[in-house]
C-alpha cells in the first residue's frame, strides 16, 4: 500500500512528545512494520490544527489529487486537524478519493466502519481541547498586556535574552531618529525610503528575520528577493508612539479568527516603559504634519469604478487610479501601488487604461449574456420534457407504492402463519 506520512506541530503542543522528528519516526516505523511503501511525507511547523490552509497539507492534497497514495499515516488524528467540522470534511474528501487515514498510536483506520464512532468522539475532544487552549492563551496574553510584558518589542528596540529587559537597538534606533529628522525637514515617506535604501539601512522585516532565523514578511521584499524600505514601512515608524517611551497594547481582540478594533478607552497604556528614542514634542510634530498632509475622505474625491478591484500579480498591491492627460483629453489609468510608492526596485510599472478595462468587462458581460440565454433555452426544453414525463412517472410511482403495500401485507401474513404453526418456540 502506498502511504504518505504527515506531521504537524503547534505552539501549544508538548515540544518533546510531539516534535516533528518524533512524529515522523513513529509514522515511519509504523509504515515499515506493516510493509507499506512510503511515497512521500510533509509537515507543518508552528501551525494550529484549527486552520487548514497549511503548506504541508497542500502537498498531501496534491498527492491525493494525483492518485499517488492509498493512505495517510499520522501519529494521531489531532495531527491532521483539531477543528471537528473541517477535519471531518477533510477525511470525507480523502474517502472520496479512496484514501484512508491511519492513526499510528490510536489504532484508528477511517476505512473501518467500527472506528466511525471513536473518530467522531476524538474529533469532538480535539476540537474542545483546541478551543479551551485558545481561551487560556488569550487570557494569559491579556494578563501580560495588563502587566506591560512585551513579547516582541517594536523596531528600534531589542530584548536582552538574559534579563528580558528592553533596550535600544543601536542601528535600528538610529534609523528611527533619521526617519523623524528627515520627515520634519520636509522629506516625504517615499523619499525617506529611497534614502534609507541607498544607505543600506536594515528594514524591520530584515532585522526580524535575522532574530527569528526565518522570513516573517515576504511583502517587504522586492521581486528579486531583497529587503527594501517602502512608503508603508516609513509611515509605520512615523505613527509609532512607542518611540516616546510609552507602551500601548490591547488595541484589538481576535475571536474566531476575526480581529476587532477596540475603543481607545479599552487600551492598556504604560508610560515610560521603553527608553525613549525621540522626544514627545518630535512625535507630536510628526503627527500634526501627517494629519495636515492627509488626503480628503473618499466622499470628497472622484470615484473610480475599478478602484480596489485590481491586484498586481507580481507584488500583490492594489492598482490605484491616476488621472492622465493625453492630447488635451483626460484619461484614467490604473497603476500598481507598489511601483507608484516605492519605485521600480520594488515592482515593475504595471498599468492599464480604464478604456481597456471597460472593453474587457463589456466583452465578458456579452459572453455571459449569450451563455445565460443558451442556459435559459436549455432549461425551458428540460422543463417541457419533464412536464411530458411527469404523469408517466407519477403513475409508475403509484404502481410501485401499491406493490410495496401488497408485499408488506404478504410479509405480515407469512409471519402470522409461522407463529401459528409453532415454527418459533419463543425461546
Image: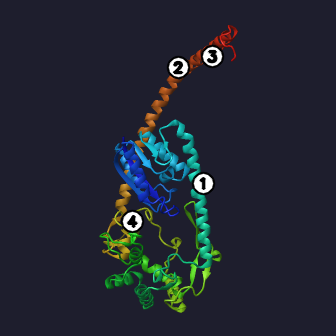
In this rendering, the label closer to the viewer, 3 or 4: 3
Residue 170 location, x and y as percent? 42, 88
Distance CA(mark 1)–CA(mark 3)? 47 Å
Residue 368 location, x and y as percent? 41, 46
Q: Does label 3 or label 4 sit earlier along the sequence? A: 4
Residue 250 location, x and y as percent? 59, 74
Q: Does label 2 or label 1 sit earlier along the sequence? A: 1
Dot 4 corresponds to which residue?
Answer: 316
Asked if marks 2 and 1 touch (Cβ < 8 Å), the reply is no
In this rendering, the label closer to the viewer, 2 or 1: 1
Distance CA(mark 4)–CA(mark 2)? 58 Å
Dot 1 corresponds to which residue?
Answer: 128
**Secondary structure found at label 1:** helix
Distance CA(mark 4)–CA(mark 1)? 36 Å
In this rendering, the label closer to the viewer, 4 or 2: 4
In this rendering, the label closer to the viewer, 4 or 1: 1
Quadrant for residue 356, please give it. Answer: bottom left
Amino acid at each position: 500500500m502506498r502511504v504518505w506520512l504527515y506531521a504537524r506541530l503547534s505552539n501549544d503542543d508538548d515540544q518533546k512528545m510531539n516534535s516533528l522528528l518524533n512524529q515522523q519516526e513513529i509514522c515511519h516505523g509504523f509504515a515499515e512494520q506493516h510493509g507499506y511503501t512510503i511515497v512521500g511525507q510533509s509537515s507543518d511547523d508552528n501551525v494550529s490544527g484549527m486552520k487548514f490552509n497549511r503548506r504541508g497539507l497542500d502537498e498531501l492534497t496534491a498527492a491525493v489529487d494525483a492518485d499517488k497514495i492509498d493512505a495517510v499515516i499520522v501519529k494521531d488524528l489531532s495531527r491532521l486537524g483539531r477543528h471537528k467540522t473541517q477535519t471531518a470534511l477533510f477525511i470525507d474528501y480523502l474517502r472520496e478519493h479512496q484514501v484512508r487515514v491511519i492513526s499510528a498510536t490510536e489504532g484508528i483506520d477511517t476505512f473501518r466502519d467500527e472506528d466511525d464512532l471513536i473518530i467522531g468522539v476524538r474529533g469532538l475532544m480535539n476540537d474542545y481541547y483546541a478551543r479551551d487552549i485558545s481561551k487560556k492563551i488569550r487570557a494569559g496574553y491579556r494578563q501580560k498586556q495588563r502587566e506591560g510584558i512585551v513579547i516582541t518589542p517594536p523596531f528600534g528596540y531589542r530584548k536582552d535574552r538574559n534579563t528580558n529587559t528592553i533596550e535600544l537597538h543601536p542601528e535600528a534606533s538610529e534609523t528611527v531618529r533619521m526617519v523623524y529628522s528627515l520627515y520634519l525637514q520636509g522629506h516625504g515617506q517615499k523619499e525617506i525610503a529611497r534614502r534609507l535604501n541607498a544607505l543600506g539601512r536594515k528594514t524591520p522585516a530584515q532585522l526580524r528575520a535575522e532574530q527569528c532565523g526565518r522570513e516573517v514578511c515576504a511583502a517587504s521584499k522586492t521581486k528579486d528577493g531583497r529587503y527594501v524600505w517602502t512608503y508603508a514601512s516609513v509611515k509605520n515608524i512615523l505613527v509609532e508612539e512607542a518611540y516616546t517611551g510609552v507602551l500601548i497594547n490591547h488595541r484589538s481582540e481576535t475571536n474566531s479568527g476575526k480581529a476587532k478594533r477596540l475603543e481607545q478607552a479599552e487600551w492598556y497604556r504604560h508610560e515610560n516603559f521603553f527608553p525613549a528614542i525621540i522626544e514627545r514634542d518630535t512625535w507630536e510634530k510628526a503627527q500634526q504634519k501627517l494629519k495636515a498632509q492627509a488626503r480628503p475622505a473618499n466622499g470628497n474625491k472622484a470615484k473610480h469604478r475599478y478602484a480596489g478591484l485590481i491586484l498586481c500579480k507580481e507584488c500583490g498591491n492594489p492598482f490605484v487610479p491616476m488621472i492622465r492627460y493625453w492630447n488635451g483629453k483626460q484619461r484614467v489609468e490604473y497603476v500598481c501601488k507598489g511601483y507608484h510608492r516605492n519605485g521600480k526596485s520594488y515592482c515593475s510599472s504595471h498599468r492599464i487604461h480604464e478604456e481597456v478595462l471597460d472593453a474587457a468587462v463589456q466583452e465578458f458581460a456579452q459572453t455571459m449574456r449569450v451563455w445565460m440565454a443558451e442556459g435559459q433555452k436549455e432549461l425551458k426544453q428540460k422543463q417541457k420534457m419533464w412536464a411530458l414525463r411527469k404523469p408517466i412517472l407519477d403513475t409508475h410511482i403509484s404502481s410501485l407504492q401499491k406493490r410495496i403495500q401488497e408485499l408488506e401485507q404478504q410479509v405480515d401474513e407469512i409471519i402470522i402463519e409461522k407463529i401459528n404453526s409453532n415454527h418459533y418456540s419463543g425461546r
